[in-house]
Image: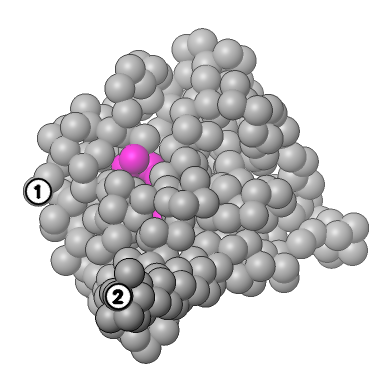
Amino acid sequence: MGSSLKTMLKIAAGSTVAFLAVGEVVYERILNRKYTNINNVSRAIDDDLYQYYGKPEDQVDGDAWFVAMHPEETVLVNSSGKTMRCNIFMQDDPTDKWMIVLHGYTSCPRGMASRAHYFYKKGYNILMPTLISFGTDESKYCTMGYHDRYYVIDWMKYIININPDAKIAILGESMGSATTMLVTGEENLPENLKCVVADCGFTSCWEEYVIQAKEMFNMPAFPVMHAANVVSKLRGNFDFKKCAPINAVSKSKTPTLFIHGEKDTFVPYWMMNKLFDACTAEKEKCSIPDAYHANSHDVHPEIYFPAIEKFLERYI
């Protein structure tokens, strides 16, 4: 072997090591639970909070209601051997109306308390899954909805098992919205799933990460995200490019309401229009003026909640 060839091989090997090292750092930073769970630490509930908040029926704030309800976790092991966790809030009077509420990145079920509270008051049973690596889930790495969709389908089966006539809606925000859309792309979904609401979801994990590469790391998408994607696949997690809600909605038969804040730059507003155009199911969209990422319900609740209610009334 010539010296020039040896030199080239050494350079190639060194470049590969450097490429993977960069990928490892970025992968850990965006998907490891010690980074993605920042907000969950402050959302723990203790006995003092229960005493402070009092009775659920006295609460007007969603977070206070969530705590006052004394939420206990329902824990199941699915057919793949994975432990799933959720909070369930049942109506006092039996009903077939169910809403699955999915939280976003760095959040947990309690982060969606305002939405859960609102629709609980409208007569829905509420099921709030803890998505992979967040909250009390023990998985080490997030999957941005890619594997979470199977958890959601398993939770639907759980609902149907205890309530065969259940009429189910799903409402997801951000990563939870992506999860929601990925669910709709699956085949042989139960007829009990009547409709979904996708609030500020991304078109694909890859497209979202490419947009955010400079924002998060002040580096170009190449080689940063390419390297992280290679590491994710080598670790058996998921391919960023295959985590693509836009492909899922192009196969969907589930009526979908798309919601997005017009000033959202984290998951850019234009993504909603791409998703809406790609969707093959019955669909509607709702733009929220002045809203940034994941705060449409706070900025214009008078637009946000009535739009969802009107949509739900068509199917449930």
Q: Is residue 315 above or below residue 60?
A: above
CA–CA distance between discs 2 and 1? 57 Å
User: What residue is disc 1 on?
Assistant: 277
Circle 2/circle 1 CB separation < 8 Å: no
Q: Say few, some or many: other residues with alpha carbon within 10 Å of mark 2 (under 14 / 14 to 19 / 20 or more).
A: few
Residue 9 x %, y %: 35, 72
Amino acid on which the number 1 mark rests in the picture: Asp
Q: Quadrant of the N terminus?
A: bottom left
Q: Quadrant of the C terminus?
A: top left
**Residue 161 in sight in this render:** yes
Residue 140 x %, y %: 64, 55
Q: Residue furthest left?
A: 277
* Left or right: 133 in relation to 233: right
* Left or right: 11 in relation to 80: left
Q: Residue furthest front?
A: 1
Span colored in magenta: 175-182
Q: Is residue 276 above or below residue 182?
A: below
Secondary structure category for the residue under label 1 = helix
